[in-house]
């Protein structure tokens, strides 16, 4: 049972480390600000949750586990809302997301668009 | 395994610092520093379990509360354009 808990904890810790590094590479390599928010969001929620749950498996049912839960709760409240505030302030200050170039006319007038117009009638 | 996780968190902190140094806009820098704060909390938690000292978790709790205050400050600043002081005439 103890070995099983250790294995589970290692799996959580290693996947948390993996997602953390992926988010770090994303925040460095992605082309513009609004896509970098995506990389930051991965590490702030998924990586943090996996690492803290892995540590909770090592701690067992104790006061340390409760403290880890409170830390996880605060991270989950603060990180997505700060990302949201950041994106809204960037939009308010005139930073526009870089979109794909508009598609050709041939691609927009295929069957899917016509079908959608028929369904809305 | 805890050492591997700590090294991965340190690598992520380094990448975030590189982005904070390079960042073309101020929002990139704020995003990178926000991520750096989150990774600091995680690193303190992992170091607590590496060294076996229980009191590091309280420090991590304090850091997450400081992140919360920073988030509220950022939200106020983006909402009102000031930190709540009296407008200068």
Image (tube, coloured by chain):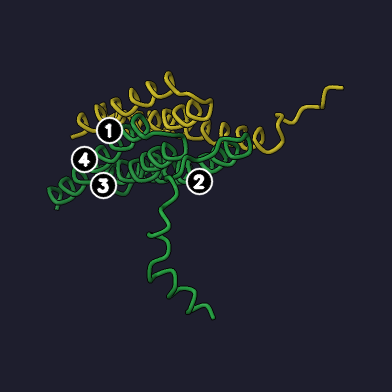
Chain colours: A green, B yellow
Question: In whole angstroms, how far apart are the C-alphas of marks 4 and 3?
Answer: 13 Å
Most extreme residue toward the right is B89
Q: Which residue is mark 3?
A: A57
Which tag, 4 or 3, sits closer to the chain's start? 4
Q: Quick check: marks 2 and 4 in contact, CB under 8 Å?
A: no
Most extreme residue toward the front is A106
Q: Residue at x 51, y 28 (%)?
A: B30
Most extreme residue toward the top is B21
- Find residue A43 and report its image quarter: top left
Q: Residues within 10 Å of mark 2 (few under 14, many from 20)?
A: some
* Badge 2 element: helix
- Residue A58's x, y, as percent? 24, 43
Which tag, 2 or 4, sits closer to the chain's start? 4
- Residue B7's x, y, as percent? 24, 27
Q: Chain of mark 3?
A: A
* Badge 3 element: helix
Q: Residues within 10 Å of mark 1 (few under 14, many from 20)?
A: some
Q: Quick check: marks 3 and 2 in contact, CB under 8 Å?
A: no
Q: What number of labels is visible?
A: 4
Q: Which residue is mark 1?
A: B49
For the residues beneath circles 1 and 3, the answer to whether they share a chain is no
* Badge 1 element: helix
Question: In whole angstroms, how far apart are the C-alphas of marks 4 and 1?
Answer: 15 Å
- Residue B58's x, y, as percent? 43, 32
Up-down: is A13 above or below B58? below
Return the mark for residue A77. Answer: 2
Q: Chain of mark 2?
A: A
Q: Which residue is mark 4?
A: A14
Foreground label between 3 and 2: 2
Which tag, 3 or 2, sits closer to the chain's start? 3
Please identify the quadrant where the N terminus of chain B is shown: top left
């Amino acid at each position: 049972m103890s070995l099983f808990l250790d294995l589970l904890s290692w799996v959580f810790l290693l996947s948390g480390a993996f997602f953390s590094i992926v988010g770090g590479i994303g925040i460095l390599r992605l082309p513009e600000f609004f896509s970098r928010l995506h990389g930051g969001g991965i590490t702030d929620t998924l990586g943090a949750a996996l690492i803290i749950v892995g540590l909770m498996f090592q701690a067992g049912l104790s006061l340390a586990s409760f403290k880890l839960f409170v830390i996880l709760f605060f991270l989950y409240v603060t990180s997505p809302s700060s990302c949201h505030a950041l994106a809204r302030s960037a939009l308010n200050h005139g930073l526009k997301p870089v979109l794909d170039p508009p598609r050709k006319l041939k691609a927009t007038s295929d069957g899917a668009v016509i079908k959608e117009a028929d369904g809305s009638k | 395994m805890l050492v591997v996780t700590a090294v991965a968190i340190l690598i992520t902190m380094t990448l975030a610092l590189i982005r904070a140094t390079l960042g073309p806009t101020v929002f990139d820098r704020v995003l990178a520093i926000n991520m750096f704060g989150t990774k600091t909390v995680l690193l303190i938690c992992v170091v607590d379990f590496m060294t076996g000292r229980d009191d590091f978790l309280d420090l991590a709790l304090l850091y997450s509360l400081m992140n919360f205050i920073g988030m509220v400050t950022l939200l106020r600043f983006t909402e009102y354009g000031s930190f709540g002081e009296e407008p200068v005439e």
